[in-house]
Image (cartoon, rainbow, N blue to C red):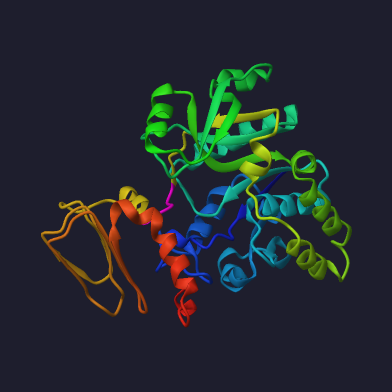
Amino acid sequence: MLYCLIIAGGKGKRFWPKSRIKNPKQMLSVATRKTMIEDTLERLKPFIDKKRIFVITNKEQVPTLKKLVLLERKKIIAEPLSRNTATAIGLGAVLIKKENPDGIMVCLPADHIIRKKTKFRKVLSLAASIARKENALVTIGIKPSYPATGYGYIKVQRAKGIGHRAKREKKVFQVERFVEKPKKEDAEKFLRSGNYFWNSGIFVWRASVILEAIKEHLPQLYSGLMKIEDCLKTKQRKEVIKEVYKGLKSISIDYGVMEKARNVFLIEGDFGWTDLGSWRAFWEFHKKDEKGNVCRGKSVHIDTYNSVIIGDKERLTAVLGLSNLVVIQTKDATLVCPQDRTQDVKLLVKEISKRRGMKKFL
């Protein structure tokens, strides 16, 4: 039986100042009229019953999330501390395995855009089939369209020894290695080679299989997860989870497990995927005016080109004689930066967090 774990605890630092700790990117209407988390749930509707969908987030975001997702309270998991994706996925796997020892779990980030929803569900169905029959770890890769340096990459080779359906699809590969976010010259080589994919961060596997992989490669995390599993139906559950989290290291599922695991397959995700990871990606995704600008809210611009201009509802944002900029205004903060520095907005957020009296802006 299929389950889904939606990972919705990110703080969306690159989307500051719109994205804040209590109202991050996945809770904003960035691509459609609905929030990104609502869009994520919507595309799962015909595929996985909402009774089998879990959302994992941090405690600060739970109040807002409860208003948006309309799931049972026990399906919204609040992490007491941020410990990256290996811990989040491990905790989700423990909960799903408790409900169904043979359950297949789909792990999805809450902040992706998928244009071709039917194709998306078809790819997930194939991934679930391979995960079930091969006891494999399956990830979804995106064929690169340009030498991106903001994504991780996965090198693949033609898959062997898998079922007939997967062979017919011709879009199933054996994973050779995972690669961290590369320099531009390396990204260009990956693009030319044809056997690298962008790492989408979408995974499919049996809950029991990923827990075994965590046991092998992250034994400290596994030990903590077993302590949590032992207390799931007790009154001490919340306290035990908090205590376990204090002793865990922050590590991603990619670095902690996937880069070391065997029997890992990749399926090409040709379903119109976009990861709106920065304001530049926002500009690339949205329709532009005749001067290449993407504008929202109250704004006026003259002799301005290829820019993102987002005004506050109350204040006018005026831009004159500039190009390739991002100008974002909210009721209490303003961001101005070059398009090619939008990946570094998180550095501004880090600096703000260090300044006395400025945490209210995060």
Image position, residue 52 (x, y; %): 70, 52
Q: In this picture, is 352 found above or below 215? A: below
Quarter of the picture containing the N terminus is top right
Compare residues 356 and 24 and report the one nearer the observer: 356
Residue that appears at 46% across and 62% down: 13
Is 277 magenta? The answer is yes
- Left or right of 201: which side holds 328? left
Q: Considering the whole magenta stretch, tell me its main secondary structure.
A: loop
Between 309 and 323, which is closer to the camera in this rendering?
A: 323
Indicate whether residue 28 is drawn in magenta. no
Q: Who is closer to the viewer here, 21 or 99?
A: 21
Relative image position of residue 70 (x, y in whole percent): 61, 65
How many marks on residues?
Answer: 0
Tell me where residue 194 appears, x and y as whole percent. Answer: 44, 23
Which residue appears farthest toward the bottom when viewing the image? 357
Instruction: Say which residue appears at 76% left-offset and 67% top-offset.
Output: 242
Boundaries of the magenta span: 275-279
User: Is residue 324 visible in the rendered structure shown here?
Assistant: yes
What residue is drawn where x is 70% and y is 53%? 87
Above/below status of 32 relative to 298: above
Say which residue appears at 32% left-offset and 48% top-offset.
Answer: 284
| Residue 250, quarter of picture | bottom right
Is residue 34 among the parts visible in the rendering?
no
